[in-house]
Amino acid sequence: MKLGAYFIEFDRTGFPLIRKNDWDFFISIFPVSKYQFESFLFENSPHRNMYTDEWYREKLKLNPRKEWWNIDEKYYELFLTGLTLREIEPFLRYLGDNFRLPIRDEWIKLYKNSRDIRETLNDLNKIKSLLKHEDVASPVFLWIEKLPIPLTNECVLEMLYDGEYFIGKPNYGLLPNLWIPEEIRSINWDTDVRKSVGFRILKEIKR
Amino acid sequence: MQKRILDFNFNVNLSLPVIIILEPSEENWNKIFNITLELTKSLPGRVEKIYFLGNKKEYKVFIPQDFEIYSAEWIRENLNRPLLIGKILENLSTDNKKRIIIVITSKEIIDLRDWENSEISKWIVFFNIGEESFIDLKRIENPIASVYIKNSDFVPLAFEIKPENIKSIIDYNDGKFILKINGDSEQLEGHLKTICSDELPKLIIQRTKGDPEEFLFQIESTWFSELQWKNIPDNLLTIINSGIDKKDFKCPNCNKIHNYKTLICPEGGTILTDFPLNTVILIKNNKYLSLSDWFAYPLKNNERIITIDGTLYDWTKGKWEKVKVIDLYEEVDNETWGLLHRI
C-alpha cells in the first residue's frame, strides 16, 4: 500500500513495516512487541523447545508485560527486551527468509524520517477500514494513534544486526541514560543493560 | 416500508458447546489428564475441542474416547509451551458463537489481562488444579436467564413452540411485542407467523453471564392453516346484521326483543350458538372468522391488528399503539366488524 512517499505492508504477525521510495528495505514501524513475538510463540516453530514457559517468564522479569491496550504510561513494557541473537533468529526465519535485524545506517534512516513517518501514519489510521481485519494485529491502530511512532526517540534500546552495537536513546524508564539516538554504543552483555535492549525487524527488498 | 406477513421456523440447541484449554505441563499432566477425562465423560457430546495454552492448534474431540486415546500424542506436541491464551481466544471470538471455555491450569496465564472486560472472558471458567482436584459441573454451566423473540415491529400472529413443557407468553411494552419463552429444555423448536418489515425477528437467549445470543429464523412456507371465512348460519344472519346496525333483535330462544349487545338470552342459552366462545369473531360480507388458536389477526394492510382478547393495536409513529378493547360489533376495518364472543 502506498501512502505519500512511503510503502506500508504487514508481516505475518499483522504488524506494519514501512519503506521510503528510495530505501531497499522495509523496516518495522514498532520495535518487536511482546504481543507480536507471542504470535510466533503460538506457532509450531521447529525451535519451539527453546521458548518454554519458564524461559518466557524469565524474560518478562526483565521488563514486565503489560496489556496491549494499556498505553498510558511505561509503554516500553509493551516491547520485548532481553533476547539474544540466538533467540531472535528463529523469529526472523518465521517471518521470512529476507528478514533480519537492521544495521546502523538503516536504523538512522528511520530515525531521520520519524516526523515525516508520523504524519504519514496518521493517514494510515484514516484508511484503516480498507484493510482486512485479519491482516492487522489488534494493537496496531491504537499504537499508531497514541504512541510517538516510530519510537526511535524514546522507547527501548535496539539491537543492530551484527550483535555488537546498540542505538542509544534517552530512556529513563528502563535504563537511565542520556545517549542521543545517532550515537552508537557498544554494550557489555554482562551488565543489566540487556533488559533494556529490544529489536526491530527489517525486510530486505531484492531488486 | 410495507409490512409483510412471514412464516418462520427455528430449531436451537440450548446446551452450550464446551472448549477445554489445558496447561501443557509435564509435572501436572497426570492430574490434568484425569480431570479432563472425567469432564469429557460428564459432558457427552458437548466437548467440541481441546486446546493447549501457547498453541492455537485445535484438537477436535468427536467422541469422549478421543481424548483418552490421543491426548498422550497431543501433550507431546505441546509440552512446556508458554502459558499464553491470546491467539486461542482470538480464534474463538471470530465466529461469534457462544461456548463455555474451561481453562485447567496451575499458574497465572501470561496474557490473560489483554482480555480483561472482553465478551469472551465472561464465558471462561478457570480451574486451578493446585486448589481443586475435581470439577464441579455446576460451576461450568451458564444458565439461561431469558429466551425471547422480538424486533422493532414484530407481532406474533400465530406460534407453536416445542417441547410441550415450554410456556410462551406475549408481553406488550412501550409499543413493542415480545414473545417470551419460559421453561427448561435442551432443544427449542418452533414455528412463527408474524407481521414484520425488513427487519426480521430474532430469537434471543440471555444467559446469566455474557451478552445475549441472537438467532435468525429460517423462512418457511406457511405452517399454520389459514383462518377460514365461513358462511354465517342463516339463523344468525338477522341477529348479526342487527348488531352491525346497532339495532334490537328478536331472540330465537325466547322470541322477545333484546338489545343488540345481548349475547346470552335472559331465559338461558347463548344467542350466537354456532360461534366459538372466548375469542374474537370477525364479520365481513355475511361470513365470519374466529381467531381460534391465533394470537392476532392482521387488518388494514397489516398496519392494525386485533388480538384474541379483542384489543386493537395500530402501527403509529414506529410503535404498535394500543387503541382500545373493541365494543360489540365495532367496525375494525373497512366493512369488517368485530366482537369478542365471551360470556
Image (cartoon, grey):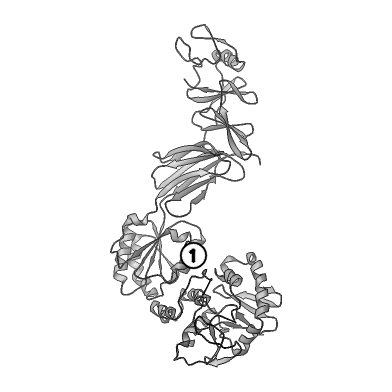
Residue at 51% in and 29% down:
B308
From the top left corner, tell me how far across and down residue B29 is, in percent. 31, 71
Task: Residue type at mark 1: give it.
Answer: Asn
| Corner quadrant of residue B37 | bottom left
Residue lying furthest right: A4
**Rendered image quadrant of residue B84:** bottom left
Q: Is mark 1 on a helix, strand or loop?
A: helix
Which one is in front, B183 or B326? B326
In the image, what residue occupies the spot 62% across and 45% down? B198
Location of residue A128 in the rendering, given as x and y in whole percent from the top left corner: 63, 67
Q: Can residue A168 be seen in this view?
A: yes
- Nearest to the observer: residue B226 or residue A164: A164
Q: Name the residue under label 1.
A: B91
Q: Residue at x 40, y 53 (%)?
A: B142
Kindly tell me whether residue A87 is visible in this rendering. no
B261 versus B71 height, above or below: above
Does residue A13 appear to the left or right of B75 in the view shown? right
Above or below for B181 versus B75:
above
Q: Tell me which residue sits at (47%, 65%) in the image.
A: B115
